[in-house]
Amino acid sequence: TQLEQALRNAIIANEVEVHFQPIVDLQNDTVVGFEALARWIDRDLGFVSPAVFVPLAEERGFIDALSETLLRKAAEAALSWPQELFLSFNLSSAQLMDPSTAFNILAIINRTGLDLRRLELEITETAMMTDPETAHKIVTELRSAGVRIALDDFGTGQSSLSRLRDFAFDKVKIDRAFVSRITSDSASEHIVKAIIAMCRGLELEVVAEGIEDFAEALRLKALGCGLGQGYFYGRPVDAEATLDYIARKY
Ligand code: G
Ligand code: G
Ligand code: MN
Ligand code: NA
C-alpha cells in the first residue's frame, strides 16, 4: 500500500521523529522523566498517528527497524538531559512476542551510552497476552539488566490482577479513561483510589496519565498519587523544545 511504502521510506530516510512528554512528581511539581512518543509527518499523507503506523509496521514485519530508530533517537536525546531524568519508551505487542527483543534493546542502549537504569519500558497487558511466557522472559531479562518496566494503560483492556502478582513490574500507569473522569464521576475516583492503595501495598510506583486540568491534578495529589502526566503539565514536544522545558522547569 501507499502508506506502507511511505513508512518504509520514512524509516530509511530517518524521518520518523520522537517527541517527549514530561512525567512529573505530583507532590512537588518537578519533572522526573519523559515518555518518548513517535511522530511522523509524511509529505503527501500529512500527520499519521503512531496508533496507525506502529500496528502497520508490526503487521508488515518491520517493527524492529522502526523501533530501533525511535529508541536510538530517544536515547540520544536523553543523553543531554540531567542524569536524574528517566526515559520511558513504549514496546509494541509484536516485540513482546519476539525472544530477541531484550537483547536488541540492550544493544541499542549500550551503543548510545545511556545508563540502562535511566530507561523504562512501557508494556500493555493486552500486548503481553498473546505470548505471556515470552513476554515474561523479556521482562525478566531487561529488569536484571537494570531497566525498569511500567504497565501501561492499566485498568483498560483485559486487565488481570494476577498479572500484577506474577510479573515483576516497577510502575503502573493508570489509563486516562479513569483520570479524565476523576472529578466528575465518583466511580472513577474510587477506582483510582483503589489502584493507588494497591500499588502502595505492592511497592509499585503509580503514574496517572492524561491529566488535563488543575482540578484533576489536585484530586490526584490528595489521593496520594506519586506521579502524573498529561497536557496540564506538558504536551509531547520535539527534542529541542524538551530541552527548553527542562531549562524552565527543572
Ligand atoms: O501519542 P499518541 O496518542 O499519538 O500515541 C498513540 C499510541 O501510539 C499510544 O498507544 C502510544 O503508546 C503508541 N506509541 C507512540 N509512540 C510509540 C512508540 O515509539 N512505540 C510504540 N510501540 N508505540 C508507540
Ligand atoms: O498508550 P499510551 O499511554 O502510551 O499513549 C499515550 C497517548 O496519550 C499519546 O498519544 C499522548 O499523545 C496522549 N496523551 C498524553 N497526555 C494526554 C492528555 O492529557 N490528554 C489526552 N487526550 N491525551 C494525552
Ligand atoms: Mn505509554
Ligand atoms: Na497509557
Image: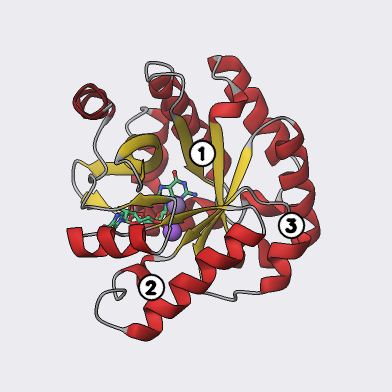
From the viewer's perspective, is residue 244 above or below residue 206?
Answer: above
From the viewer's perspective, is residue 171 above or below residue 124?
Answer: above
For the N terminus, which image quadrant?
Answer: bottom left
Q: Percent x, y for residue 188? A: 38, 79
Q: Amino acid at mark 3?
A: Phe
Q: Which residue is mark 3?
A: 167
Q: Tell me if 89 is positioned left or right of 64 in this view.
A: left
Label 1 or label 3, whichever lies nearer to me, is 3
Q: CB at mark 1 closer than 8 A to ligand 1?
A: yes
Badge 1 local density, few (<14 within 10 Å), some, or many (20+)? many
Q: Which residue is mark 1?
A: 67
Badge 3 local density, few (<14 within 10 Å), some, or many (20+)? some
Mark 3–mark 2 Cα distance, whole angstroms, equals: 23 Å
Give the quadrant of ligand 2: bottom left
Mark 1–mark 3 Cα distance, whole angstroms, equals: 24 Å
- The mark found on residue 178 in the picture is 2
Q: Percent x, y for residue 104? A: 67, 32
Q: Percent x, y for residue 214? A: 18, 58
Element marked by disc 3 = loop
